[in-house]
Amino acid sequence: MKTNFNLLVLTLLLLFLGAVRAVGQGPAVITQEVFGTMPDGREVHLFTLRNAAGMEVKVTNYGGYLVSWTAPDRRGNFENITLGLPAFTDYLKGTPALGPIIGRYANRIARGTFSLDGKPYQLTTNGSGNHIHGGKAGFDKKLWAATPVRGKEPALKLAYTPPDGEEGYPGTLAVEVTYTLQRDNALRIDYRATTDQPTVVNLTNHAYFNLGGMKGDILGHVLTIPATQFLPTDKAQLPTGERSPVAGTPLDFTEPTPIGTRIDDTTDVQIRYGFGYDHCWVLADAPGRLRPAATVYEPGSGRLLEVFTTEPGVQLYTGNHLNGTLRGREGAAYTRRFGLCLETQHFPDSPNHPDFPTTTLRPGQTFRSTTVYKASAK
């Protein structure tokens, strides 16, 4: 009996030591918890995706917000690299798009109007008389149906079906967005949509990144965008329809450049219009192929973020209108230029620019888009 007892103790001890060694290298999992309650009583959930390397991504099915993403620095220390708020009630009050799914149309549509097949449409206007990021109650303010996908790479599938006429858009649109935390420490976002009437679609995620672990602004982050052209805007930040070269302008990031180097060069009219960077870069090659869109490096931590997309453009926004009124999960005040966005998307106001890549979706067609954000350290 004593021999059996000793064997049991030894077995439990070995199992415990094995568990200790597995910390940070455990199996890929996805868990969920209650995050809050909608005003109508529906529960909101927070999902945690964890890969075998110990990286964690938290996503809520309210608006598909990317609430947090922990990534290691060059010494292996994990810290959050996306701007997010402590509680669901903070999101319910409204945010400057701190990480949600944006739709039906990301970015701007001039005066909220466009014509499709000769028929005019008037969308809701919510930004200086224009339509921006889906309108007054876009996808970021909806409760999505959530389906955890458990496997070697944890994933979360979110689904929402806006009815015909929501925010003025034609057609009932069936949308699915899937977040997958890959084994290589990349967050993959797959978008899919179908419609029962001709409509326009432009989807993205509006995450703000701060690779320094929320210890300061992003002006020292070193950015590369492999694009030789951008879309100049007018004072209302609507595209003029031109595609201008970045060479010789503050918008040239073809070589690694700290974001703060030229962000306040107000001799450039585009910097004045954007109050810094708030522009769409034209990516090389035809849309549909997954290819590099941007790279961001933070020298202090050594963290590196690589962005790949099938979209024709990437919008860089440098948090020019953050004002310190919001505090994040770590307690840091989100002051001006505390985070940067790299929104992979179709061009702004495309429905009113026939020479831009089309955003029209018709019955029988399927909108598909993929963006990958890969975190590493050097």
Image (spheres, helix red, strand yellow):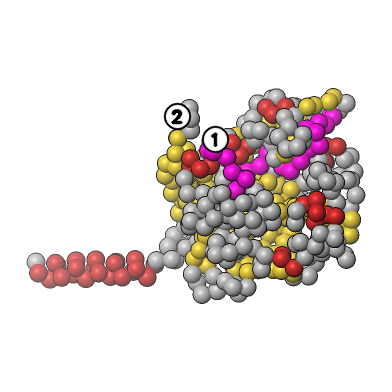
Does 336 lie within the magenta span?
no
For residue 172, side relative to residue 281 (left or right): left
Above or below, 338 against 222 in this view is above
Point out the image quarter for the N terminus.
Answer: bottom left
Task: Using the image as rendered, state which of residue 176 and residue 204 is in the foreground.
Answer: 204
Does 110 lie within the magenta span?
yes
Kindly identify which numbered label has been placed on residue 143. Answer: 1
Q: Secondary structure at mark 1?
A: loop
Residue at screen point 68% across, 46% down: 204
Badge 1 density bin: few <14, some 14–19, many ≥20, Cα 10 Å: many
Q: Is residue 320 visible?
A: yes
Task: State the count of labels.
Answer: 2
Badge 2 density bin: few <14, some 14–19, many ≥20, Cα 10 Å: few
User: In the rendering, at what x and y percent does residue 115 appear?
Assistant: 84, 29
Per the rendered image, the range of residues in magenta is: 92-116
Q: Secondary structure at mark 2?
A: loop
Q: Amino acid at mark 2?
A: Gly
Precedes in sequence: disc 1 or disc 2: 2
State the CA–CA distance, disc 1 to disc 2: 12 Å
Residue for badge 2: 41
For residue 179, side relative to residue 169 (left or right): left
Task: Using the image as rendered, state which of residue 264 and residue 136 is in the foreground.
Answer: 264
Residue at screen point 67% across, 65% down: 219
Q: Is residue 150 visible?
A: no
Point out the image quarter for the C terminus.
Answer: bottom right
* Residue 82: quadrant of the picture: bottom right
